[in-house]
Amino acid sequence: MKIQSTRFGELDVLEEQLFSFPHGIPGFPEEKSFVYILHDPESPFAFLQSTTEANLTFILVNPFAFFKDYEFVLEDEVAKELDLSEENPPQVFLIASMKGKLADMTVNLLAPIVLNGVNHKGRQVILDKTEYSTSHKLFPDGLPKEAVKGGK
């Protein structure tokens, strides 16, 4: 399948990269089909590209690479809807926002993206009763030295 992306150009997408979001994503209720694009196997970053809207790409972050204590309870209803279990645990990501410098990137700890890598369903879950915020600095102590050097 081929899709258009303003960020990536024309993409040739494999079936296993497609994820269905039956409820859409808050703010984008009509967007129900996305492509999961891994940035690099060693990177905590990935992308979620709409299959129908070329301008809609979310930057995803593995929360556990930055926030070792990040945790939440996934409601039984959501786990059942996504067909998650101990044998098939969720993949969890945060949506990142970047306005300006990389050092100022924030993530939404309050509404993680939960994916089932087996049946390729996903959902953004809005957490209740938590002190997490929608705009938490990803690099509160500044960029890591590897990022400042600019790579190899």
Image (cartoon, grey):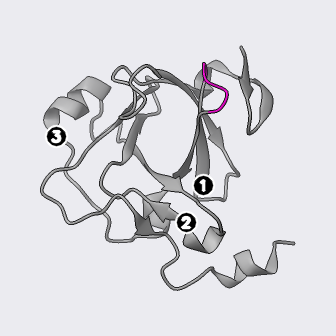
Crowding at mark 2 (Cα within 10 Å: few <14, some 14-19, many 20+): some
x, y percent for residue 8: 77, 37
Marks 3 and 1 sit apart, C-alpha to C-alpha, by: 26 Å
**Residue 105's disc number:** 2
Q: Nearer the viewer, mark 3 or mark 2?
A: 2
Q: How many marks?
A: 3
Whichever of callouts 3 and 1 sits on the residue coming sooner in the sequence is: 1
Tell me what residue is drawn at x 20 percent, y 66 percent. 131
Task: List the residue tagged with mark 1.
Answer: 45
In the depicted structure, whether residue 35 falls above or below residue 40: above
Q: Start and end of the magenta stretch?
A: 51-55
In the depicted structure, whether residue 9 falls above or below residue 1: below
Residue 13 highlighted magenta (yes or no): no
Whichever of callouts 3 and 2 sits on the residue coming sooner in the sequence is: 3
Tell me what residue is drawn at x 87 percent, y 72 percent. 152
Q: Callout 2: helix, strand or loop?
A: loop
Residue 54 highlighted magenta (yes or no): yes
17 or 54: nearer the viewer = 54
What's under tag 2, amino acid-wise?
A: Met
x, y percent for residue 35: 60, 29
67 or 58: nearer the viewer = 58
Marks 2 and 1 sit apart, C-alpha to C-alpha, by: 12 Å
Query: Is residue 57 shown left or right of residue 30?
Result: right
Task: List the residue tagged with mark 3.
Answer: 75
